[in-house]
Amino acid sequence: MLKTRTWNILDYLKTEKDVQRYLEVAFAEGNSEYIITALGNAAKARKLMSKAAKKAGVTREGLYKSLAKNGAPAFSTVMNVVNSLGYKLTLARA
C-alpha cells in the first residue's frame, strides 16, 4: 500500500524569500480568505504569532482562530500581522 503524508505549507516556507513569494502570490490572487490564511501561515512559519497577537491586542489563540479558514479578522489585526512580518500594505492602481 502506498503511504501518503499530509501536505503542509510550513514545510516549504523555510526562508524569508519563500515567505515573501508566498505572500506575493496570495495578494496577487486577490482572494481575501487566501490572503488571511497566507498571513497566518507566514506568521507561523516565522514564529511570530505571539508577537503579532500582542501587537493586535488579542490572544495568541484568538489570532490563530481569526487567521484560520473562515476566520474574519478585523482590518487592524491584518495590518498588525503584516507589520509584524516586516511588510507594509501599499495601494496601486489595478
Image (cartoon, grey):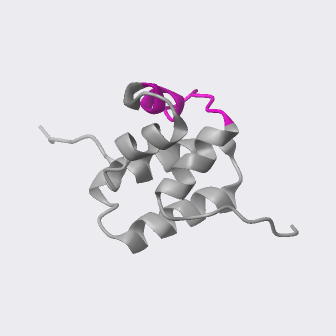
Residue 49 at x, y percent in the picture: 38, 43
Residue 37 at x, y percent in the picture: 52, 42
| 27 with respect to 80 (left or right) | right
Q: Does residue 54 appear in the picture of this structure?
A: yes
Residue 17's image quarter?
Answer: bottom left
Instruction: Kindly give the residue lying farthest to the bottom in the view shown.
Output: 17
Residue 12's image quarter?
Answer: bottom left
| 2 with respect to 47 (left or right) | left
Q: What residue span does the magenta drawing correspond to?
A: 62-74
Q: Does residue 33 appear in the picture of this structure?
A: no
Q: Residue at position x 59%, y 39% from top? A: 77
Q: Is residue 65 magenta?
A: yes
- The residue closer to the viewer here, 6 or 46, is 46
Q: Is residue 1 above or below residue 20?
A: above
User: Looking at the rendering, in which quadrant would you find the C terminus?
Assistant: bottom right
Q: Residue at position x 33%, y 53% from top? A: 45
Residue 51 at x, y percent in the picture: 39, 46
Residue 20 at x, y percent in the picture: 48, 68
Instruction: Kindly give the residue lying farthest to the right in the view shown.
Output: 93
| 53 with respect to 73 (left or right) | left
Q: Is residue 14 magenta?
A: no
Q: Residue at position x 39%, y 26% from top? A: 61
User: Looking at the rendering, in which quadrant would you find the N terminus?
Assistant: top left
